[in-house]
Every structure is written in C-alpha cells, then in structure tokens.
Amino acid sequence: MNLAKVLGTVVSSQKSEKLVGLRMLMLGVYGPDNKPTGGSVVAVDGVGAGVGEMVLYASGSSARQTVATDNKPVDAVVMAIVDSWEVDDKEVYIKGRDD
C-alpha cells in the first residue's frame, strides 16, 4: 500500500462497462515524511474518500481484491482513509491538523 492525498475527481463519460458506477480519484503520491513525491495516480474510490484527505491505496493485482473492484479492469484502488501516522516515534500526520 502507498500513501497519497486526494487531489480531485476524474470524470469519464466513455469507459468500459465494468467501470460504470465506480468513482475515480486523482491522487498525489506522498512519502512517509508527509511530502509529495511528485507522482500521481488515478484510483477507484473504495471507501468514500474526499478531496484533501490522506489515503492508502493499493496498485497492481491487489487493486482488484476489494468488493468494489473484484474482476474489474483497475490498477489502483483507495482502500483506507488515514487518521494518522508516525515515524521513529514522531507524529508525522494527524487528520484535521493544519500544517
């Protein structure tokens, strides 16, 4: 799993029938230091994440192992909304805290 921030949504009027009804999010990839890495990914939203939230996403074959994405042509899925994380006993991120 990887850390990311929800940057926005992706809308597609023409897509595979297997993707109909799935919400897609634009994610900015983050490192454990809570800094953007410069990478981005489009992922299916499996948990109801909102813009600005930090999330965990899985990619590759793991992305097709949720109820929402089972047997669907997806390569990334948001699997959790992050409340907090720490590194070396130091809090790096707490949801709702302005940095």
Image (cartoon, grey):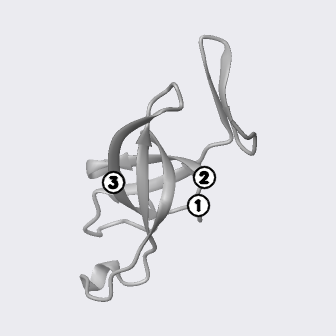
- In the displayed structure, 88 sits above or below 65; it is above
Residue at image coords 73%, 40%: 98
Which residue is at a point 34% across and 50% down the rendered structure image?
A: 40
Left or right of 36, for residue 48 = right
Q: Determine whether, in the image, residue 36 is placed left or right of residue 64.
A: right
Residue placed farthest to the right in the image? 97
CA neighbours of label 1 inside 10 A, class few (<14), some (14 to 19), many (20+): some
Q: Which residue is mark 1?
A: 49
Of residue 59 and residue 30, the one placed in the foreground of this image is 30
Q: Rounded to the nearest whole Å, what is the CA distance between mark 1 and mark 3?
A: 15 Å
Label 2 to label 1: alpha-carbon separation: 7 Å
Amino acid at the residue labelled 3 = Val
User: In terms of image quadrants, where is residue 87?
Assistant: top right
- For mark 2, what is the residue? 53
Q: Are marks 2 and 1 in contact (CB under 8 Å)?
A: yes
Q: Secondary structure at mark 1?
A: loop
Quarter of the image with the C terminus in it: top right
**Which residue bears the numbered disc 3?**
41
**Do we see residue 62 in this rendering?**
yes
Whether residue 37 is situated above or below residue 17 in the rendered picture: above
Give the crowd class for mark 2: few <14, some 14-19, many >=20 residues within 10 Å.
some
- Three-letter amino acid code at disc 2? Glu
Q: CA distance from mark 2 to mark 3?
A: 15 Å
Q: Residue at x 33, y 81 (%)?
A: 12
Find numbered disc 2 in the image and state the secondary structure of the residue it sits on: loop
Q: Give the image location of residue 94, x and y in percent.
A: 71, 35
